Image: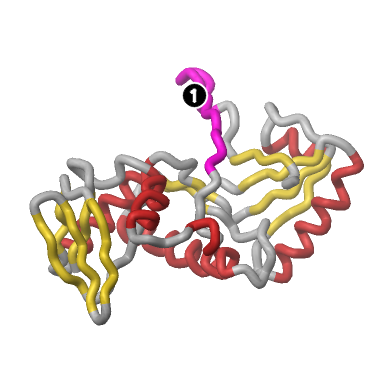
Amino acid sequence: VLVLERHARVALENSSRNSGVIHAGLHHPSQWLRTRLCLRGRELLVRRLKRDELPHAITGKLIVAESAEGVAELEALSARADDRGIATTMLEAREVTALEPQVIAHAALLVKPTGVVRTSALVRAIEAELTDAGALVLTGAEVLGVDARAGTIEVAIERLRFDAPRVVIAAGLGTDALLTAMGLDLDALGLRQRWVRGTWLALPDAHRKAIARLVYPLPE
């Protein structure tokens, strides 16, 4: 197994530039592969984090309703959670305040298995496991193209070309360019990425512990 990484070390892009949330698997339809992978993945991920003593916390998540109109949606989410074996608790306004004094809500659903993980540490642990098992992680190796041919796939990186029986592409935001270079029609295949900008705000150290749990609005 050969891992090609274009940067000087792993986890400098998407892998360590996300929210680091360990999702419960609540929000998407049950028949979606994404949902099935999330439910099974959470179980495996938490087991690994505990085994390797990697930095994480199962904090729980509050999905809040700002008014009485949102309570029915919370109850529907609670029923869905029950069907999937996800532990949740419905909270009234005073119970929300008791848990999180800084959160003002008419009601909330506490999703207990949700947590956070330091993703950069997780990726480095996976890298160490790969190398211990005999895989080669080659850094500073940007893939210039993948040429699929009968019976083999030719991969070209700077100063090197080689054949491989199969290739797994996990190029993050660079995936579109790589797949297009392979001659694939991303729009026809429904694979083109749709980027949405997000804004992150960092709190001063004095306020870092003002909220202990994740807090989400009702999903739209």
Residue beneath disc 1:
202
Nearer to the camera, 38 or 187: 187
Circle 1 packing at 10 Å, graded few (<14), some (14-19), many (20+), is: few
Rendering colour mode: secondary structure
Specify start and end residues of the magenta stretch as a single range: 195-209
Task: Please determine whether, in this image, residue 211 is positioned above or below residue 113.
Answer: above
- Image coordinates for residue 152, horizontal then vertical, percent: 23, 76
In the image, taking residue 151 as reference, residue 134 lies left or right, namely left
In the orientation shown, which residue stands out farthest toward the left?
159
Nearer to the camera, 99 or 214: 214
In the image, taking residue 103 as reference, residue 138 lies left or right, namely left
In the image, taking residue 143 as reference, residue 72 lies left or right, namely right
For the N terminus, the quadrant is: bottom left
Q: Residue at position x 18%, y 64% from top? A: 2
- Image coordinates for residue 36, horizontal then vertical, percent: 57, 70
Quadrant for residue 150, please give it: bottom left
Q: Residue at position x 20%, y 44% from top? A: 9
Magenta span has 78? no
Could you tell me the amino acid type at mark 1?
Answer: Ala
Task: Please determine whether, in this image, residue 50 is positioned above or below residue 203.
Answer: below
Nearer to the camera, 28 or 133: 28
Q: Residue at position x 25%, y 47% from top? A: 10
Task: Please determine whether, in this image, residue 144 is positioned above or below residue 37.
Answer: above
